Amino acid sequence: MYCKQCGKQVNDTSHFCGGCGAQCFNQHNDIFTQATINPNTGQAQQFGADQNNTMALVGLILAFFFPTLGIIFSIIGLVRAKELGGKGRGMAIWGLIISIIHIAVTIIMTILLLTVFREWIEYLFDWAYRMQ
């Protein structure tokens, strides 16, 4: 393959061009891989093919128990899915949908309890007051 920056021929397994040092992308894998240099160690780090979108998974799980946190983590998972080539996008979207439905159902049930069952709630408070 050839470097897109300087046009020199680069080994197919190389992650960087020997001439200009630009990042090279492996065209022989089905999964898009990319490498960067870690500034702390100076060594190449590969990412893309082997990374998972854990934020999307956490957002989906939290959607069932803590919907507000589910929305936050799902949005982070959506942003991260763009960086990972769409990995985890479906989980992040479902985390958002379930979180929004969970919050909507909670609001509707609260309104129903406060309006429709108002007399029943007042009766319970009166009964509790008389028990003191």
Image: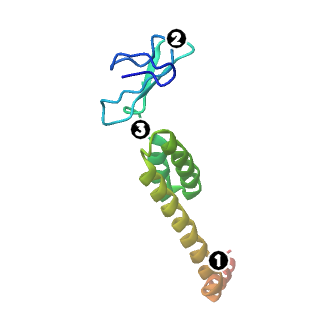
Mark 2 or 1, nearer chain start = 2
Pointers 2 and 1 in contact (CB under 8 A)?
Answer: no
Report, in whole angstroms, how far the alpha carbon at label 3 lies from the one at label 1.
53 Å
Report, in whole angstroms, how far the alpha carbon at label 2 lies from the one at label 3.
23 Å
The residue to which callout 3 is attached is 52
Q: In this view, does 76 lie above or below 2?
A: below
Q: How crowded is mark 1: few (under 14 residues within 10 Å), some or many (20 or more)?
A: few
Which is more foreground, mark 3 or mark 1? 3
Report, in whole angstroms, how far the alpha carbon at label 2 lies from the one at label 1.
67 Å
Q: Position of residue 58 (x, y in %)?
A: 47, 46
Image colouring: rainbow
Tag shown at residue 38: none
Q: Position of residue 106 (x, y in %)?
A: 57, 70
Q: Is residue 34 above or below residue 73?
A: above
Q: Where is residue 35 in the image (x, y as percent from the top left)?
A: 45, 23
Whether residue 122 sits left or right of residue 103 in the image: it is: right
Image quadrant of residue 79? top right
The residue to which callout 2 is attached is 41
At horizontal 65% and vertical 80% (from top left) the residue drawn is 114
At horizontal 52% and vertical 49% (from top left) the residue drawn is 78
Q: What residue type is labelled 2?
A: Thr
The residue to which callout 1 is attached is 128
At horizontal 50% and vertical 63% (from top left) the residue drawn is 97
Which is more foreground, mark 2 or mark 1? 2
At horizontal 41% and vertical 34% (from top left) the residue drawn is 51
Q: Which amino acid does label 3 sit on?
A: Asn
